[in-house]
Amino acid sequence: MKRPALMKKGAEANLYLADWHGRKAVLKRRLPKEYRPKMLDEQIRSYRTIHEPQLMHEAKKAGVPTPIIFLVDHKSTTIVMEYIEGKQIKQILNEVSKSQRQSLCFRIGELIGRLHEYGIVHGDLTTSNLILRTEGKIFFLDFGLGDKTKELEARGVDLHLMKRALQSTHYKFADECFESAIMGYSTVLSPRTSENVLEKIKEIEKRGRYVSERKERE
Amino acid sequence: MTKKRAEERYCLGIESSADDFSVGISTFNGKILANVIDAYVPSEGGIHPREAARHHAEVASKVLGGALKESGVKPQNLCVIAFSQGPGLGPCLRTGATVARALASYLKIPLVGINHCVAHIEIGKLAARTKNPMTLYVSGGNTIVAAFEAGRYRIFGETLDIALGNCLDVFAREAGLHQKPGLPFGAVVEKLAHGGKQLIKLPYTVKGMDVSLSGLLTAAVVLSKKGECGLEDLCYSLQETAFSMVTEVTERALAHTGREEVLLTGGVAANKRLQNMIESVAREHDARFDVVPTRFAIDNGAMVAWTGVLAYTHGTVTPIEKSQVRLRWRLEEVEIPWMQ
């Protein structure tokens, strides 16, 4: 493998552009964090390196596109995976037309629905972790904070985090985007389940600090 | 009348959202002339809102007089009265608001209601001379990662349940520790943590850019009641785990937005270990690191006075009839015209 070039310095990992036997690949290395104790740091990095590819694999079974995993080395906390040619949803969501935006969010919602239906929560549903591949498929990345669970609570938090990410990064369209996503989501999960998840999101919001939802009760 | 220069115009700010009653005075060009704080220390348990409010009412005139004396400003030379309108504890906020309304009416000068969270960010920016940072605001009531974007402070991450300061306080209380005036629970835990050597495994919960601290608190309290772990080790482990979590989400927000400045503000910002962690992350991402000075880290009137100046000079005035306190006033709801 050629010496990889640093592509992106993320929060928890460095991404390098690499060559995997003639295929364009991404090398994701979780580097030690000097701010936290060594033992805690090693636990976190090792856990996420092992779990991320497992969840990515499971996601494919659920019908959600994720990059192909080429190599996992938990000693150097490194994953080598397929490079997805395309654009981050974060970069395009504010640029496209309203109907395109709605259709994108609807499809994202459908895919989240498939993950949840299969028993996976993503754990970090920001628009920088979603890639629209050139030919139109939406890929999910960064399963490091994900989990295998069908709990209502975990599903609710997953969608709540997505709503919050939309509000901070796409504040102009946050509400319509989330609404479209929920519409897509509801086509996959049974109406009763999606209704329960929506109720759960409200409950989670009420639990938070100074949330407008809570004002109604005062 | 000739228009006075900024350094001769003054705003008096009143802070009373939780356990501190404080009055600060700021000039219109950001010089803090007074910042008098009187803390309510409960004899047992946490902050009882009504008891805290009673304390505030008792010390109000003493603190107010102290601030005026310290600044050398005569009441008739004040231009505007600012007060913490929310978020916070109802009875406490109402006491401060009552004092503010009375002062503004008596002096016939405008009243400005300030969002407490905005004030913590603004005083940090003023003291550190930083312009547009990614801010980690950690206190007894709040744990927020926010940055300015298109007219408002947008929340990138926050706690899904309890605040970081609250987590440390409740643990300390449950572990049988005591706070004293000038030595709050956070400082007691920090001191004990210095002696800790062994890292005890505690729940580490990061969800996207949010954290959840209630599970960590429960686990730490259960371990302390069992009495199998040393208190120093527990304090150390609680701090290391909780601080690692908030540091991780701050780093996520930093990497997500590519900001070049990081500001640490709020009461827990006084903790040296947390400062080291956030500084380390800032260095890693080539961002400048600043921390609010301790006297402005805890709840204080100076931050309200300075934010009052910013708001008032950008056209914000709160008529008495709209000055009711707002217990759950979210940071994101506030328009920030002075950042345009």
Image (cartoon, coloured by chain):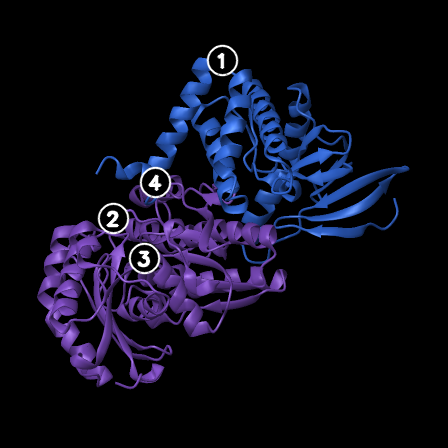
Chain colours: A blue, B purple
Q: Earlier in the sequence, mark 2 or mark 4?
A: 4
Mark 2 crowdedness (10 Å alpha carbons): few <14, some 14-19, many ≥20: many
What x and y, as percent, mark residue B291?
Answer: 45, 68
- Which amino acid, by three-letter code, is at mark 2? Leu
Residue B115: which disc? 3
**Residue that mark 4 sits on:** B218
Q: Position of residue B235 (x, y in %)?
A: 38, 54
Distance from disc 2 to disc 4, alpha carbons, whole Å, reads 26 Å
Question: Which residue is labeled 2 in the image?
Answer: B327
Query: What amino acid is at disc 1?
Result: Ser
Say yes or no: labels 2 and 3 on the same chain.
Answer: yes
Tell me what residue is drawn at x 80 percent, y 46 percent.
Answer: A17
Taking the spot 59% from the left edge, 63% from the top edge, the residue there is B260
Circle 3 — which element? strand
Q: A204 above or below B202? A: above
Q: Chain of mark 2?
A: B
**Foreground disc of the pair 4, 3:** 3
What is the three-letter code of the residue carrying label 3?
A: Asn
How far apart are the two marked residues, 4 and 3, measured between alpha carbons? 31 Å
Residue annotated with mark 1: A190
Foreground of the two, A61 or B200: A61
Q: Check the picture and name the quadrant holding the N terminus of chain B.
A: bottom left
Alpha carbon distance from label 1 to label 3: 42 Å
Kindly identify which chain the residue marked by label 4 belongs to.
B
> Which chain is disc 3 placed on?
B
Position of residue B48 in the picture relative to residue B220 (left or right): left
Sooner in the amino-acid sequence: mark 4 or mark 3: 3
The chain identifier of the residue carrying mark 1 reads A
